[in-house]
Image (cartoon, coloured by chain):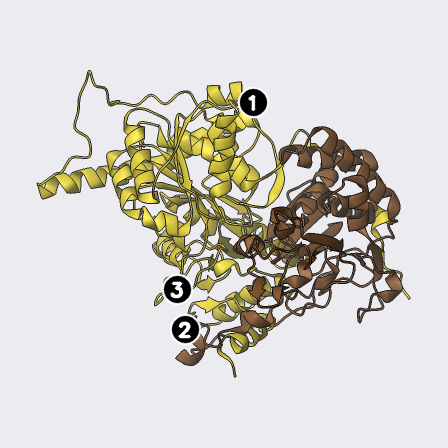
Chain colours: A yellow, B brown
Amino acid sequence: MMRTKLISELKPRREITPTIAGAKMMTGNVAAAWAARLAEVDYIPAYPITPQTEIVETLSQWIALGEMNAKLTFLDSEHSMLTAAGTGSLTGARVFTATSSQGLLYGFEMLYNIAGWRAPIVLVNVSRAVAAPITLEPDHNDFLSTRDTGFILLQTETCQEVLDLILLAYRVSEDYRVLLPSIVNLDGFHLSFTREPVKLPEIEEVRSFLPRYNPPYPFRASKPSAKGVAVLRPPLYSFYKYQMHLSSLNAIKVFKEACDEFEAYFGRRYDVVEKYMVDDAEYVIVMMGSFTSIGKKAVKMMREEGLSIGLLKLRMVRPFPVQDVRRALEGKKAVAVIDQNISPGFGGTLYAEVSSALYNVEKKPKVILPVIGGIGGKTLSLDEFRYIVELMKKYQEGGEPEPILLFREDELREVESLLKIGVGG
Amino acid sequence: MLIYARFHGRGGQGVKTASRILGNAAHFEGYYTQDFPIYGAERRGAPVVAFTRISDEPTPIPERGYIFNPNLIILADESLLNDPIVNPISGLQNSGTLFINTSKPVDKIFINRDDVRIVVEDLIDLSLKYVGKPVLSTSLGAVAAKLTGIIRWVSLEEGVKEELLEIGIRGEMLEKNILLAKACFERVYPTPLPIPKLAEPRKIVKINWMPVDLTIPEIRNVGNTRVRKTGNWRIFKPILNPEKCTRCGICVIYCPEGVITMTDNGLEIDYDNCKGCLICFNECPVKAFNYIREVEAA
């Protein structure tokens, strides 16, 4: 009989892994707070909501201890919090704030205003699925509801990425070619409360990478101006709105430039998308957020079994990186888009975006498979990724794919037993 | 991956802190580490689960969420062992280790698995001895670190310090916790843990439309909280001396669980639901309450 291999036989004491040397264990929430601290933000309007609260609690503690110099104010709702954030930014302050789910929706009206005012705040959203039914677990419906607000939308996979993308978000938002606010999203629990090793950049380097915000027209008593004005001529509204669109498109180039500089300063490389084993792959899975880590593991395992597969991670959602998505996916046999969100009556939001990006491409993939997975925090497993590949192969033979939900037999059994407790019978 | 550790306990017992102590220790030992808790709306006494993943790869851990197939399980509260909802030993790998905090000897622990190693220790007793309080976070973290077999004392000591300083414990209290960690670390012995295996493949099923009696999120089978006894979280049992009691009713007002009732025959305590917070003991103006350490779960 073969003996089970045991851990202690494999690994005696070893040296520190170089990639974590100097890193500190911290949650995604604390990493977000560190980014605000390193960006030396001036103003933090706040309102608590799970799973975001740890961010403003951490900032509040640092300010109370004198470790951070910023003005933190608790407002009476997310609506007033976001109003304060936008107006604060118009005075020329660098503004940071954070919320989640219902809180984001409660302040929703102001998102359009802040973007329309061209106030470059950075808002961290800690994803939590939207009620009803009520849950604390994550999916991306809250984040993607902001798709049309004019905010730059960035999505993170690791705690390190949370910190880094917030710094990058300020760079992009405050650039005059863009001058639009950003939302940096991190998944509740899987990043917000999960600790991983995070390297903190030196403050001098951050100062040099991200100089103080220099507003084009700061609000000053000595130099009055009227902001947030009404435009009662329709062409004027069209003009302003389309300028927002063009400025948003600029953010792709500005982000890429900032990423080059970021790498020179801090040694970590980012882009609007991340290609994992994509270049030589015949099949590609598109997804975003913290569950991408699970996807990468599945892709790696299937590669080891000889399958030609890769994973395309979307880091930037608005502006939508159409060219990068096209170049990554053209010529592939099949693409599956995993949406960790659901638009009832249609399916997933990203599926529509990826499909529209590919429609006019000459060598477009034959199959684009719409997949709904991981909503309400439901975990994804290797089984589900294998199933996606089976379907991609099946539809290559023919047929029109419909949106499918990733759901396992054991999970259905669990649901059935819980329903029994809840409704009797 | 080397270690998939899962911690089970109740809110307030320090399970999250324990998973972070193990996480810190593994991090200082030089491994890529990830730790995180899962809990619902915060409530002391509710079951809590936390996880620590330790990897020997030089890249971020490509996994997230619940650990279904741990090779190490740390159970903070023996009363959860047979809880069908928590099901703390589910998925424990063949030849993995199950640690239970209990005052019982190991031959009095019954689980229907004979392919896993069970380790027991009375951590409440050790915590009372070294710290003077029934704090489980440090002791659970220390036991877990030792049972992995890959963490040295120096890394654990650093890990305990970092975590406790972060939650505001310093000075003499910190030193006592370090002594407690050392005692726990020396008390248990690791046996090699199995290399984590993949879960058995599971089928993907199609979800079809179902009628409204099952698909509106509402509970129509109401009133089942009464069968959920919360008294099994108790570590200390308050005992009322009726001769000293003046029936002033202060304990009735202060009891956060509402388990003390004034009757014609004096005060009655509902031990099925008393969580042993000892607020009655602390608030009683004539010191009519005493308490005892509860060894058997209620």
Q: In terms of secondary structure, where does tag 1 sit?
A: loop
In the displayed orientation, state which residue is furthest to the left: A233
**Crowd band around label 1 with a 10 angstrom C-alpha radius: few (<14), some (14–19), many (20+):** few
Amino acid marked by disc 3: Gly
Q: In percent of the image, x 56 and y 22: which residue is there?
A: A202
Residue A347, numbered circle: 3
Relative to A58, does residue B193 appear above or below in the rendering?
A: below
Residue A14, numbered circle: none
Q: Do labels 2 and 3 share a chain?
A: no
Q: In percent of the image, x 36 and y 32: which residue is there?
A: A173
Q: Nearer the viewer, mark 2 or mark 1?
A: 2
Amino acid marked by disc 2: Ile
Instruction: Point out residue B228 in the picture as x, y percentages from the top left corner.
Output: 60, 69
**Crowd band around label 3 with a 10 angstrom C-alpha radius: few (<14), some (14–19), many (20+):** some
> What residue would you read off at disc 2?
B216
Relative to B228, does residue A425 appear above or below in the rendering?
A: below
Chain letter of the residue carrying label 2: B
In the displayed orientation, state which residue is furthest to the top: A222
Is residue A274 found left or right of A169 in the rendered image?
right
Instruction: Point out residue A126 in the picture as x, y percentages from the top left corner.
Output: 46, 46
Amino acid marked by disc 1: Glu
Do we see residue B223 in this rendering? yes
Residue closest to the eye, A249 or B2:
B2
Q: In terms of secondary structure, where does tag 3 sit?
A: loop
Rounded to the nearest angstrom, the CA distance separating label 2 from label 3 is 20 Å
Chain letter of the residue carrying label 3: A
Cβ–Cβ under 8 Å for marks 2 and 3: no
Residue closest to the eye, A365 or A265:
A265
> What residue would you read off at disc 1?
A202
Q: In terms of secondary structure, where does tag 2 sit?
A: loop
Instruction: Point out residue B242 in the picture as x, y percentages from the top left corner.
Output: 68, 60
Residue closest to the eye, B220 or B31:
B220
